C-alpha cells in the first residue's frame, strides 16, 4: 500500500508498505478521507509536540474515515463494506482510567499519529472494531473524518456544562473554535461569543453560528458575564481575559495547545469559585458526533476549504498558512497528480 511517511521535519515521502493484518478484535479499513490537524502540521514543521518527539519515520493523520475491508478473529464478516468513522485510540482495557470510562486518559494509550504510532495518511489502517463507528448514509466521508475534531468540541462543551440558555465565550476561531461554537449552539446556548485576532476567522465563526465575533484588541471580552468560557487558542492573554469574563460559579475549560505554563488570575478563580478544567482528546463522543451531523445540527462539510491527493500530503500539511483556510482534507482515493 501507499503511505505518506514523515522522515524528518519538513520531509514527507511516499513509500510502499505492506497492508496491515487485522489482529483479533480489529477491523482493516481502506482509508478514504483524512483531515489535516494542527498537530500534524506541528509534527511536520517541528518534529515534536511537547513530550511527544518524532525519532523514527512516522505516518501522520488521525482524523480519518474509510470502508471496512477485512476483519480479525471475533469480528463479524458482515462488517466488511461498512463505511466507518475512525476513533483513533487504542486504550489498554485493564487500566483504572479505562475501566472507569475515562479511556482517553489511559496512560498506555496508543493514539494514531502520536510517536511512535502510525496514523492514517495511507491506504489501509487497522483499529479496534468498537472504535470503527458506522457512518449513516447521509454523512459524507469528509464529515465522517471530521467527527474527530468534532469530538474534541463535544468533550469541551460537555465539560463546560453548556445547556439550554447558556452564554458561552470561546477564544480562538480556528477549526476547533468553530466546531466548539457549533456544538455550543446545538447544546442550547443562546449566546456564543468568539474572539480572534484574524478578521477572516472572525467572519468564519459568524458564518458557523457564533452570535458575535470580537477582536480582543478592540473589544474587551472581560466586560462580558458568561456562564462558560472555553479556550481554543492556547494564548496566555486570551486565557487571562476569558477567565475574567466568567460569572461567579461558572466554568473554564482549557482546550488550546499553546504555552506550557502561564500566569492565571488566581484571585478571580478563587473568589468567584470558578470551575477550571482541561480537555485531553475525548471519550464516548462518537455516537453524539454522528447524530449531530446526520441531523444537520452540525455542518462539517462547509469547513473543508482545501483538498489534496495522498501524494500531496506535504502541501496539505502547509495549507493552514493559506489565508482563509479552515480545514484541509486528504482524499486518499484521488489519483496521484504528481509525475
Image: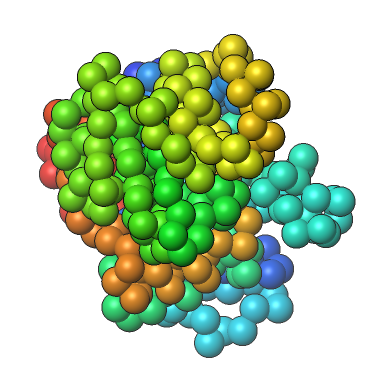
Horizontal and vertical percent position of residue 204: 19, 42
Horizontal and vertical percent position of residue 266: 66, 19
For the C terminus, the quadrant is top left
Q: Pick out the residue farthest to the bottom.
A: 78
- How many numbered circles does the render carry? 0
Q: Is residue 208 above or below residue 174?
A: below
Instruction: Report if residue 151 is visible in the image.
Output: no
Q: Quadrant of residue 280?
A: top right
Instruction: Report if residue 76 is visible in the image.
Output: yes
Q: Residue at x 29, y 28 (%)?
A: 196
Looking at this view, is 198 or 287 the one in front?
198
Q: Residue at x 55, y 61 (%)?
A: 285
Q: Residue at x 73, y 53 (%)?
A: 102
Q: Residue at x 21, y 46 (%)?
A: 206
Q: Is residue 266 above or below residue 303?
A: above
Q: Quadrant of residue 250?
A: top right
User: Which color scheme did the rendering employ for the protein?
Assistant: rainbow
Looking at this view, is 291 or 30 the one in front?
291
Q: Is residue 117 above or below residue 104?
A: above
Looking at this view, is 2 or 34 the one in front?
34
Horizontal and vertical percent position of residue 187: 45, 63
Horizontal and vertical percent position of residue 168: 43, 45
Amino acid at each position: 500500500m501507499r503511505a505518506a511517511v514523515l522522515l524528518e521535519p519538513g520531509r514527507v515521502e511516499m513509500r510502499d508498505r505492506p497492508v496491515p493484518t487485522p489482529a483479533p478484535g480489529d477491523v482493516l479499513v481502506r482509508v478514504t478521507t483524512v483531515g489535516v490537524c494542527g498537530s500534524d502540521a506541528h509534527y511536520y514543521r517541528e518534529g515534536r509536540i511537547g513530550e511527544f518527539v518524532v525519532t523514527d519515520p512516522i505516518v501522520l493523520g488521525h482524523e480519518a474515515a474509510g470502508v471496512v475491508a477485512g476483519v480479525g478473529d471475533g469480528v463479524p464478516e458482515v462488517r466488511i463494506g461498512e463505511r466507518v468513522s475512525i476513533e483513533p485510540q487504542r486504550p489498554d482495557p485493564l487500566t483504572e482510567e479505562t475501566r472507569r470510562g475515562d479511556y482517553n486518559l489511559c496512560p498506555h494509550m496508543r493514539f494514531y499519529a502520536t510517536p511512535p504510532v502510525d496514523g492514517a495518511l495511507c491506504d489501509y489502517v487497522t483499529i479496534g472494531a468498537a472504535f470503527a463507528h458506522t457512518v449513516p448514509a447521509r454523512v459524507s466521508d469528509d464529515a465522517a473524518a471530521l467527527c474527530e475534531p468534532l469530538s474534541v468540541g463535544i468533550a469541551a462543551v460537555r465539560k463546560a456544562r453548556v445547556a439550554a440558555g447558556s452564554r458561552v465565550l470561546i477564544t480562538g476561531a480556528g477549526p476547533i473554535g468553530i466546531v466548539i461554537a457549533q456544538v455550543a449552539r446545538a447544546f442550547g446556548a443562546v449566546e456564543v461569543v468568539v474572539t480572534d485576532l484574524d478578521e477572516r476567522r472572525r467572519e468564519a465563526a459568524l458564518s458557523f453560528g457564533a452570535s458575535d465575533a470580537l477582536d480582543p484588541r478592540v473589544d474587551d471580552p472581560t466586560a462580558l458575564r458568561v456562564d462558560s468560557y472555553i479556550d481554543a487558542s492556547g494564548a496566555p492573554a486570551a486565557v487571562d481575559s476569558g477567565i475574567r469574563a466568567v460569572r461567579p460559579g461558572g466554568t473554564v475549560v482549557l482546550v488550546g495547545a499553546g504555552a506550557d505554563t502561564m500566569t492565571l488570575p488566581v484571585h478571580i478563580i478563587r473568589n468567584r469559585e470558578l470551575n477550571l478544567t482541561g480537555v485531553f482528546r475525548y471519550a464516548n463522543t462518537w455516537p453524539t458526533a454522528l447524530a449531530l451531523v446526520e441531523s444537520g445540527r452540525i455542518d462539517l462539510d462547509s469547513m473543508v476549504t482545501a483538498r489534496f491527493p495522498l501524494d500531496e500530503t506535504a502541501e496539505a500539511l502547509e495549507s493552514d498558512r493559506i489565508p482563509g483556510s479552515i480545514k484541509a482534507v486528504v482524499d486518499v482515493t484521488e489519483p496521484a497528480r504528481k509525475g
